[in-house]
Amino acid sequence: MVEPSDNDVRVRIYDHFVRHGRPPVPVELAAELGISPVEVEGAFHRLADDHVLVLAPGTPYIWLANPLCALPSPFSVETQGRRWWGICIWDALGILAMLGTDGTVSTACPDCAEPLEVSVRGGEVSGEGVAHYAVPAARWWDDIGFT
């Protein structure tokens, strides 16, 4: 058997996330790929080092497989009867683009807490608001959870 590459692991992560609504844990992917959980964890860490994934601090568990977030966040995405989470508006809209579907992103104004909603229909974005990034894009990975 040919050992799966890190990219094979990456593809399986996204496939699992989309099918199950959550990222896989190492033992699940190990069983699918016919390798050990330690090998999967190694791939997870390499993918995290390459900014493909974000692991929960001090664990081998996936927090983010951009644009998908494993935990509820301020950016809820509703599409096809399912809910997803993005850590920012960029990722939330990216979920709809990745899935190739229409949907709605719900969040709140960080200043006044008023609800905000952005819809995507037929590739067109509608809604009111301004997306503001407090950190320049070149520094997002300094602390991707904050960004």
Image (cartoon, rainbow, N blue to C red):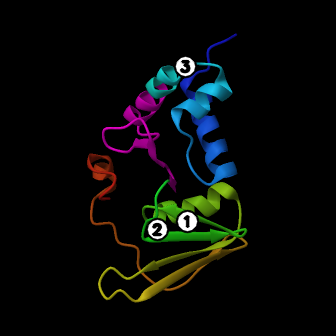
Q: Position of residue 92 (x, y in %)?
A: 52, 64
Left-right relation of 37 to 46 = right
Q: Position of residue 33 (x, y in %)?
A: 65, 24
Q: Label 2 neighbourhood size at 10 Å, few (<14), some (14-19), many (20+)? A: many
Q: Inspect the magenta stretch and tell me whether residue 57 lies in it.
A: yes
Q: Residue at x 32, y 79 (%)?
A: 110
Q: CA distance from mark 2 to mark 1?
A: 6 Å
Q: CA distance from mark 1 to mark 3?
A: 35 Å
Q: Inspect the magenta stretch and tell me whether residue 138 lies in it.
A: no
Q: Label 3 neighbourhood size at 10 Å, few (<14), some (14-19), many (20+)? A: some
Identify the residue position indicated by label 3 in the image: 36
| Type of amino acid under label 2 | Ile
Identify the element where label 2 is drawn: helix
Residue placed most toward the observer, 125 or 58: 58
| Type of amino acid under label 3 | Ser
Q: Name the disc covering residue 89, or none.
A: 2
* Of the image marks 1 and 3, the number of the one nearer the N terminus: 3
Magenta-tinted stretch: 43-69
**Front disc: 2 or 3:** 3
Determine the image quadrant of residue 21: bottom right
Q: Position of residue 36 (x, y in %)?
A: 55, 19
Q: Name the disc covering residue 93, or none.
A: 1
Q: Residue at x 62, y 28 (%)?
A: 8
Residue placed most toward the observer, 129 or 114: 114
| Type of amino acid under label 1 | Leu
